[in-house]
Image (cartoon, coloured by chain):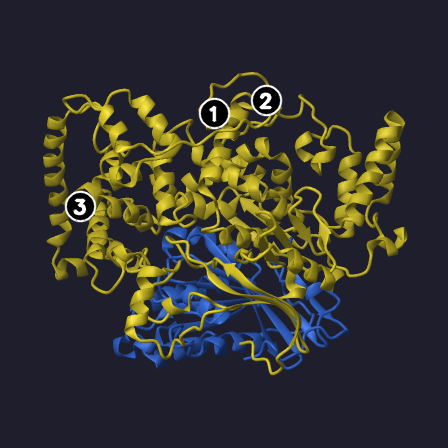
Chain colours: A blue, B yellow
Amino acid sequence: MANRSGAQRPNGTQGKICQFKLVLLGESAVGKSSLVLRFVKGQFHEYQESTIGAAFLTQTVCLDDTTVKFEIWDTAGQERYHSLAPMYYRGAQAAIVVYDITNQDTFGRAKTWVKELQRQASPNIVIALAGNKADLANKRMVEHDEAQGYAEENGLLFMETSAKTAMNVNDIFLAIAKKLPKNEQVTGAGTSGQGRRLVESEGQQKAPGNCCK
Amino acid sequence: MDELNDQGVELYSHHGVLVKSQNQIRDDDSHCSGTLSIIEYSGIGKCIEWKPTEVLVDSETNDQEWAMVNAVGRRNRTSSGSNESQSRCRSVRIEVAHLKSFRVTRNRQQVTLMERDGTTHSVFFFQHGNADCFVAALKGNIKTVRSKKDKHLYIVPDEPESQLDRSFAELELFTENTTDVVWKFVRNLHHRPYETTLETFAKLTDIWLFKSSEQRREEEVAELLNRSLTLNETSADAIGEEYAVVDLRNGPLLPPRPPAPRGPPLSIEQWAQFQDEDGHIVEVEILKDIIFRGGVVPNLRYEVWKFLLGYFPWDSTHADRQKLRKQKVEEYFQMKLQWRSITPGQEQRFSDYRERKSLVEKDVNRTDRTLPFFAGENNENLMLLSDILMTYVMYNFDLGYVQGMSDLLSPILCVMTNEVDAFWCFVGFMDKVCSNFELDQAGMKQQLQQLHCLLSVTLPDLSAYLEKHESGNMFFCFRWLLVLFKREFSYQDIMRLWEVLWTDLPCPNFHLLLCVAVLDTQQHILMENNYGFTEILKHINDLSLHIELDSTLSKAEGIYHQLTSAICLPDVARKIIGLDPLGGPDTLEQKEPLQTTDIDNGLKVEEGPESLETLTFSPRTGEVAFERSLNLNYL
């Protein structure tokens, strides 16, 4: 079942609690798991193992009076496992498509993912493009402006990130959180139910700010 | 991220609590000692905190020496080198409000904490005294209910107020179909008045008095009621084992699970006794049985694995093997030369090759780098790993390289150390598991279905639970199956497990029974925490490095014996574990693999507006859809 964790409990915060499903997509070894690990645990492993199947993590951020809880699906990147991807992006309200700035092929693959999401994911999905491994600027193969131009054309959020140095990692998740609708209306859900459950409740359990960066 | 200004008020603390961290320690058993406390913060409320006693070196100030010492002594699960190794003991903080349940084990010395989102924290081990004080302190701060099915498990109910305070009417048990429910009740009452009444009210009480979680909503209770009130219910569908009606017509009757003792590993002396003068291996079946029961002593692996993996035939002589090896060396280097002699220009125009090469490079670089064998920059063994995988690409170009293969090769290379021997042993291993890596995932799908089938006859309650929680596709076992538990066990354990599995004893697909055995151990945790699709996946992922190998193997063998002597075991299950079909009418529906069973595989569309998430499966495209629909009740 979907209803998990604290979001539905009546003893929540003063403000709203929003829960969003976010999926990470992108070519193998571009740093999807590393971005999540940095965002959720503040850690970085130089030789992060490949992801087999999928991993699921949660992290909460605070935006003004709203607590945004991300349910993050981290997926295996290799093309062979592509057929499993729809299982993760269906019903997702946000996606981060990741490429490696030192590898032009991964940028091409990212564009393919964006297209697939635009075609098959929820119509209102918020897509962010992350050019990861920005710390390896001396090996850069994808120009910042090229990616930014592409992102603008396609209405994507865009940042260059580095899971290693933590550059822009929290920022990209926060930017997504800001862009996600925090109200209850659901527009054009189409075939994939775009559900978010929101609770406005009294009580003071969690002070806003404790989970903010 | 958690920048708190207030220091908090300490409500309780206990020194000398050991932690074996979740993401650490693949190969050694070091623990960190620290203090476990309950602290109340004005901001986030009460938290359970564990802080290591030893002073940690900040990552900014670490020097090379420290990092190196740690890289050898304390490897962690996913990383090695640079800035991570010194931070092996991380503080742990769990908000009490997020606590879902905890388990107290090992003479009340161990506590495992589980959160609502499925996170399972590392075990806290109380080396001084036991966990009683901590548990008492915890109970003083939150309401807990002891699980009826797992006496070690304590569940935190969601609503602080007593369920009994609510009136029956408030529960709104029959929002949708009151009439149906009532009529079914009346009908059953007519036939079996006493049982029907008792059963119904027992369940009501059970559900509402010991309501295990927020997730049982009114509709579900109604559904439970419905099911209990419906005739022709199969025992597999019965909720709660206390009430399961054993009925031979409806499912197999499993005898009690017999004990299956493990044994010592095959020793060097024993191994010598199994070889005749010429080097033939004699009495192979007895030999395999010893290996099945206890594995092989580590320094024999180098020899025995070559037979287990079909590189050397059991009935070959010393001379045969010498000859064979010479041949295999030649064959290997021939294939190696093929890719080594591809020029950069050729590579440019050979995208299929280029793709495969790039995949190998990416994965080699991050395979088991925490092990000394693969640690450090420019490690020669990494080169071997890469060369063998590239040569395998030439050996089986159509399959190529698929993620997971480097995991399968790593322990073999570590044991063989020789490039050629490792390659041919890897080929033998791949022959056993290559269907896992097929492009259409058919091999994986079939295994997941077979696993579901075996689960449904062995643990019908859990199987029914999983189906009801969108997990009947068993997808949460994907990683277990794809790389045969490589990510779930320590390096020493995985070597032991694989050599056991390579004996093909006691039956085909024994690894699926191993999955069932792990799930048997976890079933109460999954069910009583009322975990859903995501929490189940997270909980199962978090089991990595926390599964006890020998007891699990023993349990799996016990399950095998149960199944072989079960009455009315359906043929579909019999076939999976290599038993002859009985041919009689099956009580479980038999379906052709793939298409129909896919649909039957728990991927059911739930109806009604109360359904939050649905999983659909399209046999035509092989696409699994996971949807969350809008639930008006929650808005």
Mark 3 and mark 1 lie on one chain; the one further toward the N terminus is 3
Q: Position of residue A184 (x, y in %)?
A: 69, 70
In the rendered image, residues at marks 2 and 1 fall on the same chain: yes
Mark 2 and mark 3 lie on one chain; the one further toward the N terminus is 3
Residue beneath the point at 87% across and 36% down: B183
The residue labelled by disc 2 is B586
Residue kind at label 2, given as amino acid type: Asp
Residue beneath the point at 56% across and 76% down: B2
Q: Quadrant of the C terminus of chain B?
A: bottom right
Instruction: Give me the disc on residue A193.
Output: none
- Tell me the SS state at disc 3: loop
Mark 3 or mark 1, whichever is nearer to me: 3
Q: For mark 2, does the 10 Å Cα neighbourhood hold few (<14), some (14 to 19), or many (20 or more) residues?
A: some
The residue labelled by disc 3 is B418
**Mark 2 and mark 1: Cα distance apart in space:** 13 Å
The reply to whether the C-beta atoms of the residues labelled 2 and 1 are less than 8 Å apart is no
Relative to the observer, which residue lies in front, B169 or A42? A42
Relative to the observer, which residue lies in front, B221 or B375? B375
Q: For mark 1, does the 10 Å Cα neighbourhood hold few (<14), some (14 to 19), or many (20 or more) residues?
A: some
The residue labelled by disc 1 is B575
Q: Is residue A146 left or right of residue B179?
A: left
- Please identify the quarter of the rendering in which residue A19 is found: bottom right
